[in-house]
């Protein structure tokens, strides 16, 4: 016995929920790190171009596939391919990917919550110390307590469903996140030497647009918009037939880009304020190290002007901001396998969530133990000349590698299996002027020609770089 599929109650609810899925740690911290390492303004320019000319058509296609079938990736691919097992397998990859991404994302969210709790309890100096992060990630008491709290928050939102859970949470968390982000930007811009960071970030130097910068900007744009995760197919299945998909996708892309841009105005001026002579290209190895090792030092340095309590308050404000962003993304990521179990396996929403929390919870514990607590998970395997932990493998395989492959498969499916005509008919619903427009021509042409080539190129380069230590672009 099937039940009627839930829908978002409004277009605004869908846009905020979709934006919530896209706006996460990758926007707030990953984008500024990549911008710093790839030429600042040059990276920003390329990123914006890629969002609207490469990523937007893929986003539109994912939403259209979801709405047409009212199903998650597995059901959507099966329905539109006439029951093809091969495309059903591609759909399952689109469900397995977010499930595994949720594991490493859960670890990061737990760390953020732990840092927030420690900051509020007056331990900012400990977090900023050279040994703080290393000890923290091996403190089972803090980590597993925080894991229970984070899991409870996510379960509370997801068990309530689409309208009363995801949409309601997005309507509260997203505006709050935007306001908090703007407050942080205003504060950071008042710091000494902050304008050096603004100049580096906003003024593009075209001489810095290299193959490495282009690759970094395209990868960041693709990842930050949650493409290839099955999220937008699943969320698309919850929107009604009157919704303008193209217009909604533009707003989601614009929102995501605006948050990434604003985050750059928060992080980079703060970095230059902390050290005016910093070499941005050597700022950090990753967004993870920036959040948990570099930024606490910046916050602690503020005590010379606003005192320890003031510095701790600013740090707590920041970690709350990132925590909100992480929760909205985590909810979106987990909704994909939840929807799969409800739609394809006919489980109740509560049973589906229980199954996921148990299985993903076990894997999350294993990933949490892979930072020194248990040697088996810490030295899980080796490739590209180095030892990799269980956490590293999940990140490298499912986040860095599989996402562009899923994007490539979607382009091929929409253009050559579902066909461009059916895509146009679906996108014309809610948008009477779509048929015959230049937007229609561009989406149909790009999805069937250069976008899959580019996305597949990212996939091949990532495989070569991650697992064989060789980069096609020489970076």
Image: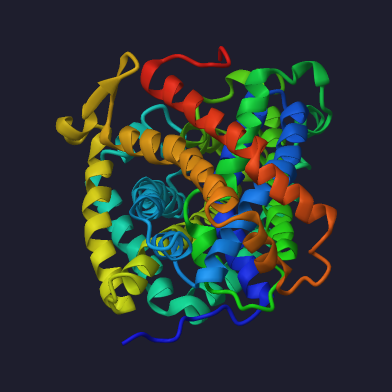
Residue 338, percent across and down?
A: 36, 67
- The residue under the point 47% across, 39% down is 405
Name the one closer to the observer, 429 or 400. Answer: 429
- The residue under the point 72% across, 70% down is 244
Residue 399, percent across and down?
A: 43, 40
Q: Is residue 307 visible?
A: yes
Q: Is residue 187 visible?
A: no
Residue 364, percent across and down?
A: 27, 49
Name the one closer to the observer, 385 or 143. Answer: 385
Q: Is residue 439 left or right of residue 18?
A: right
Q: Is residue 254 left or right of residue 397?
A: right
Residue 191, percent across and down?
A: 75, 38
Count of marks, rendered view: 0
Asked where in the image residue 83 lies, by quadrant, the reply is bottom left
State which quarter of the image contains the N terminus. bottom left
Q: Is residue 402 left or right of residue 51?
A: left
- The residue under the point 46% across, 52% down is 116
220, above or below 6, in the image = above
149, above or below 399, in the image = below
Colour scheme employed for the rendering of this structure: rainbow
State which quarter of the image contains the C terminus. top right
């Amino acid at each position: 016995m099937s039940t009627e599929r839930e829908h978002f109650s409004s277009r605004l609810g869908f846009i905020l929920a979709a934006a919530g899925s896209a706006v996460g740690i990758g926007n707030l911290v990953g984008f500024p790190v990549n911008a710093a390492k790839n030429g600042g303004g040059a990276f920003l320019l390329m990123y914006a171009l890629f969002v609207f000319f490469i990523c937007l058509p893929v986003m539109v296609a994912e939403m259209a596939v979801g709405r047409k079938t009212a199903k998650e990736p597995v059901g959507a691919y099966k329905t539109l391919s006439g029951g093809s097992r091969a495309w059903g397998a591609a759909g399952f990859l689109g469900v397995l990917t977010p499930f595994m991404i949720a594991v490493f994302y859960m670890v990061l969210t737990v760390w953020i919550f732990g840092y927030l709790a420690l900051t509020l309890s007056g331990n900012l100096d400990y977090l900023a110390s050279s040994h703080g992060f290393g000890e923290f990630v091996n403190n089972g008491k803090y980590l597993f307590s925080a894991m229970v709290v984070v899991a409870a928050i996510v379960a509370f939102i997801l068990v309530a469903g689409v309208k009363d859970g995801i949409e309601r949470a997005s309507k509260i968390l997203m505006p709050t996140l935007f306001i908090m982000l703007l407050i942080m930007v205003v504060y950071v811009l008042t710091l000494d030497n902050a304008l050096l960071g603004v100049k580096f970030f906003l003024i593009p130097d075209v001489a810095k647009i290299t193959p490495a910068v282009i690759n970094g900007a395209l990868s960041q744009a693709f990842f930050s918009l949650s493409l290839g995760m099955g999220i937008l197919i699943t969320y698309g299945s919850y929107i009604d037939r009157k919704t303008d998909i193209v217009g909604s996708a533009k707003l989601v892309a614009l929102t995501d880009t605006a948050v990434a841009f604003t985050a750059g105005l928060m992080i980079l001026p703060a970095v230059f304020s902390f050290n005016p002579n910093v070499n941005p290209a050597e700022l950090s190895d990753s967004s993870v190290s920036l959040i948990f090792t570099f930024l606490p030092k910046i916050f602690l340095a503020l005590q010379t002007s606003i005192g320890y309590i003031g510095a701790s308050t600013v740090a707590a404000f920041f970690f709350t901001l990132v925590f909100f962003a992480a929760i909205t993304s985590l909810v979106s990521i987990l909704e994909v396998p939840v929807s799969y179990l409800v739609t394809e396996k006919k489980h109740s929403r509560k049973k589906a969530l229980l199954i996921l929390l148990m299985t993903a919870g076990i894997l999350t514990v294993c990933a949490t133990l892979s930072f020194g607590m248990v040697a088996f998970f810490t030295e899980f395997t080796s490739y590209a000349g180095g030892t990799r932990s269980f956490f590293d493998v999940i990140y490298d395989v499912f986040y860095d590698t599989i996402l562009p492959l899923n994007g490539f498969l979607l382009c091929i499916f929409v253009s050559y299996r579902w066909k461009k005509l059916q895509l146009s008919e679906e996108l014309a619903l809610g948008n009477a002027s779509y048929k015959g427009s230049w937007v229609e021509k561009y989406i149909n042409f790009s999805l069937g020609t250069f976008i899959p080539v580019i996305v597949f190129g990212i996939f091949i380069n990532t495989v070569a770089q991650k697992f064989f230590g060789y980069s096609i672009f020489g970076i």
